[in-house]
Amino acid sequence: MIEKNIFRPLPNVKKSNLQFSETGVEQEEEVDPAWPHLQGIYEFFLQLVINEAVEVRSLKVYVTPQFVQEFLELFDSEESVERDYLKNILHKLYAKLVPRRKMIRKAINECFFALIHETHKFNGAAELLDILASIISGFAVPLRDEHVIFFQNIVIPLHKVQTCSQFYEQLLRCSMLFLTKDRTLAIPLLEGLLKYWPFANCIKETLFLTELQEVLEVCEVDKVEHLIPKLFKRIVKCIGGIHLQVADRAMCFFENDYFLNILKTYKEKTFPMLVPIIVDLAENHWHKILQESLIALKTILKEIDPLAFDEALKLGPQQRKMFAVKQDEDERKSMDKKWEKLNAKIKMKQPDYDEPNMPFKSSNLIRDFNELYAKIYDKEKFIQA
C-alpha cells in the first residue's frame, strides 16, 4: 500500500529561491495537489517504523535494494515537508534494521555519486547529509577503510558541486565530524578545498574560506608545508579581489592564532607572497575600512619579523615572479598571441576548424557557459523564465 502511493514520478513544481526583498515581486509557491493525501501515508509509514510492536524480521523483508533506491529518488522532491518525512523515516529504518545498514549506506553513496558526476542538483542532499552526520558520529575509532574511502570519494568531491551552497552547512558538519575521528584526514580535505575552489561565485568562496579556517585549526603544522604556496596564493587572491565580503572574510585569517603560527613557521615562503601585495593594497585599496585593516595587517607582519619584511620588499622583478599570485598582464597578452597564432595555423590546414569558445576570455560572460549563474546576473529574466 505504501509503495503504491508514494513511489511515483515527482511533479514538476517550481519553487522560487529568490526572496521578495531581492525581486520586489511576491512569489506564489505551487503545492503538489496530491500532498494532503500523501501526508497521511507518510505519517502512517513513520508510525509503523517507530512502533516497537513491529518486528525487525517482518519489516526487513520489504526493505529491499529496489525499495531503498526508489525511496531515495523521492528525496529530489520540491516539497520540503515531504523531504522531512523521508529523512525521519529513513533515519528510523537505519536505526532499526541493523542487517540493512550497509545496503542503505551503499544506496546513499550511489545517490551522491550521481549528484557529483551527473546531475549536479539534488533537492534532498541536505537531508541525506543530516542522516549521514548522525551515522558518522557513531563510527568507531580508528575508522574503517570503507569510511575513509567514503570521505575521500564523496565528502571531499561534494565541495565541487555548483549547487553545494544549498547544503553546505550539513556538508561542513560531516567534514568536521570526520576530522574529529581522524585528524590525518585534514590534509586531503585541505587539498580538496584548494583544488575545487569556486570561480566567480562569491557566496561559495566565503563558505570555502570559513571551512578552510576551521580545517587549518585541526592540521598539524609540519604536514602543511607542501600546501603553503597554494594556500597563501589563494588567501592573497581573496584579499586583493574585487568582492568586499570575500576580502573581509579572508582578512579574518590573520586574527587566528593557528594560521599566524603557520605564517611564522614558514615565513621564508609566506612573506615574499604576502608582504608586497599587502603593502600595495594598504596604500591603494578602494575601500576605506578595509584599507585601515590592511594597514594594521602590514604593521602585524612587520612586527613578526622586521628583517624578513624588509627582505620581501627588496625582491627584484624576476624573484617576485616566483611568488606572484596572478599572472603578469604583459605575460598574459603574450600567451594569448601565441594561442592566436596557433589557431591561425590550424585554420590554414583545416578550413572548417572552429576555435574553442573559452569562458576565461574578457569578451565572454560566465552565464553563457553555466545556466546556474543566470539568476545572479539577470534576476528579472530568471523569474520570468
Image (cartoon, rainbow, N blue to C red):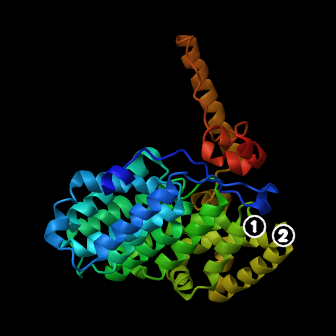
| Residue at the image position 71 percent from the left and 47 percent from the top | 329
The crowd level at tag 1 (other Cα within 10 Å; few <14, some 14-19, many 20+) is some
The answer to whether residue 200 is left or right of residue 107 is: right
The residue singled out by tag 2 in the image is 287
Tell me the quadrant of the picture where the C terminus can be found: top right
Q: Indicate which label's residue lies in the foreground, 2 or 1.
A: 1
* Quarter holding residue 254: bottom right
Q: Is residue 227 visible?
A: no
Q: Secondary structure at mark 2?
A: loop
What amino acid type should be assigned to the residue bearing mark 2?
Answer: His
User: Residue 305: x, y in percent?
Assistant: 62, 86
Q: Secondary structure at mark 1?
A: helix
| Residue at the image position 78 percent from the left and 46 percent from the top | 380
Mark number displayed over residue 378: none
Tell me the quadrant of the picture where the N terminus can be found: bottom left
Q: How far apart are the two marked residues, 2 and 1, measured between alpha carbons?
A: 8 Å
Q: Nearer the viewer, residue 143 or 258?
A: 143
Of all residues shown, which one is farthest toward the left? 57
Mark number displayed over residue 244: 1
User: Residue 321: x, y in percent?
Assistant: 62, 57
The answer to whether residue 311 is left or right of residue 93 is: right
The answer to whether residue 268 is left or right of residue 136 is: right
* Quarter holding residue 365: top right
User: Residue 201: x, y in percent?
Assistant: 64, 56
* Quarter holding residue 150: bottom left
Please tell me whether residue 252 is drawn above or below residue 237 in the rendered image. Answer: below
Which mark is first along the chain, 1 or 2? Answer: 1
What amino acid type should be assigned to the residue bearing mark 1?
Answer: Leu
Q: Nearer the viewer, residue 313 or 212?
A: 212
The answer to whether residue 137 is left or right of residue 171 is: left
Q: Please report contact status of discs 2 and 1: CB closer than 8 Å, yes or no.
A: yes
